[in-house]
Amino acid sequence: MTDPTAASSAGRAWYADGLHFQCTQCGNCCTGPPGTVWFTNEEAGRIAETLGIDTAEFYARYARKVDGRWSLTERKTTHGYDCIFLDRASAPGKALCSIYQARPAQCRTWPFWPENLRSRNSWETVKRVTPCPGMNTGNLVPIEQIGILRDATPR
Ligand code: SF4
Ligand code: SF4
């Protein structure tokens, strides 16, 4: 059944007026059920540099192969399967990315992933299910910026 909140191909995107988003650093999008955080070899190099280790050590300690692709590893916690770089200790009540400046494109483009932007209904569902308290709050992200992030999402 067609989602009535999706724009037709010829129509105006439902988010044409932009979307509000401001991360609260809750960490919910970096945990949950087992998942994958894809990265490229170039991104691996940047993360390794941030960590002060060589790329081979980064792969050995923090990466795993899933369906032939490289993903960051996870750690089981009381919250779920946390990304290995999710830091719950440094700031009370927050969960921070310990490699923030070097985080992969998959993380940089959240929550403006194509599947989340398919319709208003998709957007509201992912906000509720994650849950992501930063969606629909804070700064207005214009459609041009949304498009850049959407198109940079790794597939
Ligand atoms: S779930 Fe949303 S608010 Fe929480 S860390 Fe992720 S992007 Fe930020
Ligand atoms: S790399 Fe950072 S932003 Fe990406 S999932 Fe891991 S903790 Fe979250």
Image: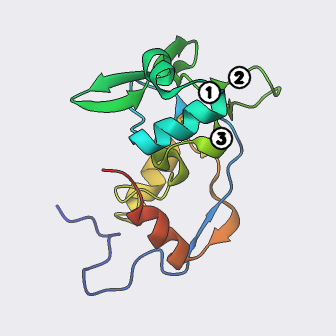
Comes first in the chain, label 3 or label 2: 2
Q: Measure the alpha-carbon separation of dots 3 and 2.
A: 14 Å
Q: Is residue 123 above or below residue 101?
A: below
Amino acid marked by disc 2: Arg
Looking at the rendering, the quadrant in which ligand 1 lies is: top right
The x and y percentages for residue 123 are 45, 57
Q: Are marks 3 and 1 in contact (CB under 8 Å)?
A: no
Q: Is residue 110 left or right of residue 63?
A: right
Residue that label 2 marks: 88
Q: Regarding mark 2 in the picture, which secondary structure is present there? A: loop
Q: Regarding mark 3 in the picture, which secondary structure is present there? A: helix
The x and y percentages for residue 133 are 64, 46
Q: Is residue 32 above or below residue 77?
A: below
User: Which residue is at a point 42% across and 60% down the rendered structure image?
Assistant: 152
Q: Measure the alpha-carbon separation of dots 2 and 1.
A: 6 Å
Q: Are marks 2 and 1 in contact (CB under 8 Å)?
A: yes
Q: Measure the alpha-carbon separation of dots 3 and 1.
A: 10 Å
Residue that label 1 marks: 86
Q: Is residue 10 left or right of residue 140?
A: left
Q: Are marks 3 and 2 in contact (CB under 8 Å)?
A: no
User: Which residue is at a point 52% across and 28% down the rendered structure image?
Assistant: 31
Label ID, residue 100: 3
Question: Where the N terminus falls, by quadrant?
Answer: bottom left
Comes first in the chain, label 3 or label 1: 1
Q: Regarding mark 1 in the picture, which secondary structure is present there? A: strand
Q: Give the number of the mark in front: 3 or 1.
A: 3
Amino acid marked by disc 3: Tyr
